[in-house]
Image (cartoon, rainbow, N blue to C red):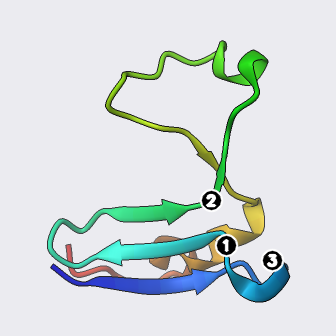
Amino acid sequence: MALHMLGKDPESPDGKSPTVYLDDETGNYILQGWKVTDPARLGQMDIPEHETVIEFPVRMMQFFPEVKGAATDS
């Protein structure tokens, strides 16, 4: 398995987060973003114990190949 970084948030301080990756084995995206901890927001979702919720800005959509109009290998 290899993760391919597709892009980092150009407006993030120090360029550390959020980040969009593509897993070339599964064809799934892996998103690094801000952890959602607000109880009111979390209370509006049904999150299974084995999952987590992150937040990332709309400007990060540019890094998804489907948005760029590029084909994926998956």
Q: Residues within 10 Å of mark 1 (few under 14, many from 20)?
A: some
SS category of the residue bearing label 1 = loop
Report the side of 15 relative to 28 (left or right): right
Can you give x and y, in whole percent of width and height, for residue 74 in the image?
20, 72
Is residue 28 shown above or below 47?
below
Can you give x and y, in whole percent of width and height, for residue 65 in the image?
46, 79
Q: Residues within 10 Å of mark 2 (few under 14, many from 20)?
A: some
3 or 1: tag closer to the N-terminus: 3
Q: Name the residue under label 3.
A: 12
Can you give x and y, in whole percent of width and height, for residue 56 in the image?
69, 57
Q: Residue at x 45, y 85 (%)?
A: 5
Can you give x and y, in whole percent of width and height, for residue 30 in the image?
41, 63
Q: Mark 1 points at which residue?
A: 17
Residue 48 in view of the camera: yes
CA gap, disc 2 and disc 3: 11 Å
Q: Work out whether residue 58 or residue 70 is closer to the camera in this orientation and state it.
A: 58
Q: Residue at x 52, y 73 (%)?
A: 20
- Callout 1 amino acid: Ser
Q: For residue 11, what is the image quadrant?
A: bottom right
Q: Are marks 3 and 1 in contact (CB under 8 Å)?
A: yes
Q: Name the residue under label 2.
A: 33
Q: Do the residues labelled 2 and 1 touch (CB within 8 Å)?
A: yes
Q: For residue 34, what is the image quadrant?
A: bottom right
- Callout 3 amino acid: Ser
